[in-house]
Image (cartoon, helix red, strand yellow):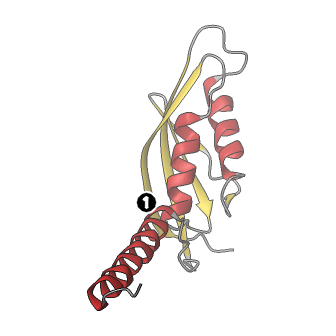
Amino acid sequence: MTASPARAVLGVLLLAAAVAGIDLVRDKTLTRHEPERRGTALLVEVTATARDGAEEDEAGLAEALASLCRLEVPASLAPGSFESLGDHRYRFLLVPDLDTADARQFHGCIQDLRIDHFLARVSSMESVPAPAR
């Protein structure tokens, strides 16, 4: 019993399509990091609300949340950068700037991490020149 050339070609084409499909799925689902962005930082603004029963004041909870979430990315809170803007808004600087994948990770952490009687949402994230050392 011999396989026809058409059958062999069809088998090769199916194998090539399967390999290409696997490669495409892998490319779309793996995190890809970009080169470090030297000389820039990430300015983050969050809106936060502490409800009755919170064991810490709103600013303290917002700063704690920023500190916890920065542990998930390769950046630090710039010293002295955490500030209250009033009206439940807070701003801080992460150094160095984050690539797209890490910025998405940080954003998700801020919005998903739960602290009793406290809720925060990211209002904005933008790249800015890094502070002079």
Q: Answer above or below: position of 44 versus 90.
A: below
Residue 61 occupies which quadrant of the picture? top right
Q: In which quarter of the image is the C terminus?
A: bottom right
Which residue is more in the foreground, 74 or 16?
16
Quarter occupied by the N terminus: bottom left
Residue 85 appears left or right of 3: right
Structural crowding at the residue carrying mark 1, measured as other residues with C-alpha within 10 Å and reported as few (<14), some (14–19) or many (≥20): some
Instruction: Indicate whether 23 appears above or below 122.
Output: below
Residue tagged by mark 1? 126
> Looking at the image, is 54 positioned above or below residue 130?
above
User: Under tag 1, what secondary structure?
Assistant: strand
Name the spot of residue 85 as percent of width and height, x first.
48, 38
Q: Position of residue 83 (x, y in %)?
A: 58, 43
Residue sitting at 48 percent across and 45 percent down? 45
Q: Nearer the viewer, residue 115 or 66?
A: 115
Q: Is residue 45 visible?
A: yes
- Please identify the quarter of the rendering in which residue 57 is found: top right
**Does residue 84 appear in this view?**
no
Residue that appears at 37% across and 85% down: 3
